[in-house]
Amino acid sequence: MIARITGTLVSKTPTELVVDVHGVGFHIHIPLSTYERIGAVGTNITLYTYLYVRDDALQLFGFATENERQLFKLLISVSGIGPRIAQGVLSGMSVEELQVNILQGNVNALTSIQGIGKKTAERIVLELRDILAKSTPDATLTIIKSATSVEIRNEALLALLSLGFTQQAAEKALRAALNDLGSNHCSTVEELIKEALKRSASR
């Protein structure tokens, strides 16, 4: 098991990157959340990794945080969800948002992620809600308390999609707004939409 990799970032795209470790180039699949956190090409980076083993291939997945990796492992334990779908889920929502929506059984929020239908979202909730509640008892209360901000973000996302944004563009605009303002400063859906539109127009 390759648990962590530290090396020079050789190349990156929103879904994969190459890291040079003492002359060996590791091809690593990543979620969009990790892509947005890692440094520029040529810098030294560290990724938490998970090696997915199949009969015909070995696939290495990388994450910016240990929490991302743990949630990835939980997602691929769900019936019918492979690593590619789990990678897409983590690209569509932050770890905290996923935890909130799973703990609350918010199937509609999960189906807003590209490639996740109602049945898949229901399986995620059914198979992971109790596991999350038991595995993070100290964090559960904090997660639930953040539900309001997550609901605001979900409503803002749906609004941006209705305005013609693609899923990826809407997620990127919202992340930029939240990163610049801080989630605690966005008290209404309207405020978050307005800030996301500003940042989308400036890029």
Image: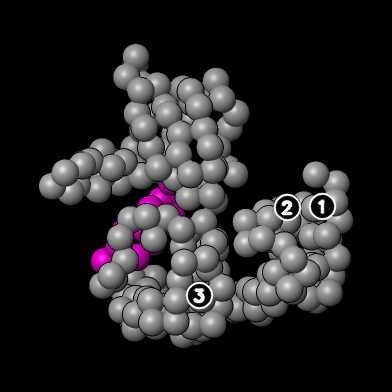
Q: Classify the position of the N terminus by image quarter.
A: top left
Mark 1 residue crowding within 10 angstroms, few (<14) / some (14–19) / many (20+): some
Residue positioned most to the top: 23
* Vertical position of residue 4 compared to residue 66: above or below: above
**Contact (Cβ within 8 Å) of mark 1 with mark 2:** yes
Residue in view at x 46 percent, y 58 percent: 88
Q: Is residue 154 magenta?
A: no
Between residues 18 and 166, which one lies in front from this camera angle?
A: 166
SS for callout 1: helix
Q: Which residue is mark 3?
A: 110
Q: Nearer the viewer, mark 3 or mark 2?
A: 3
**Spatial separation of the CA atoms under disc 3 and disc 2:** 21 Å
Identity, as a three-letter code, of the amino acid under mark 2: Ala
Residue interval drawn in magenta: 63-77
User: In the image, is 167 to the left or to the right of 177?
Assistant: left
Give x and y (percent) for residue 30.
44, 45
Between residues 61 and 187, which one lies in front from this camera angle?
A: 61
**Spatial separation of the CA atoms under disc 3 and disc 1:** 25 Å
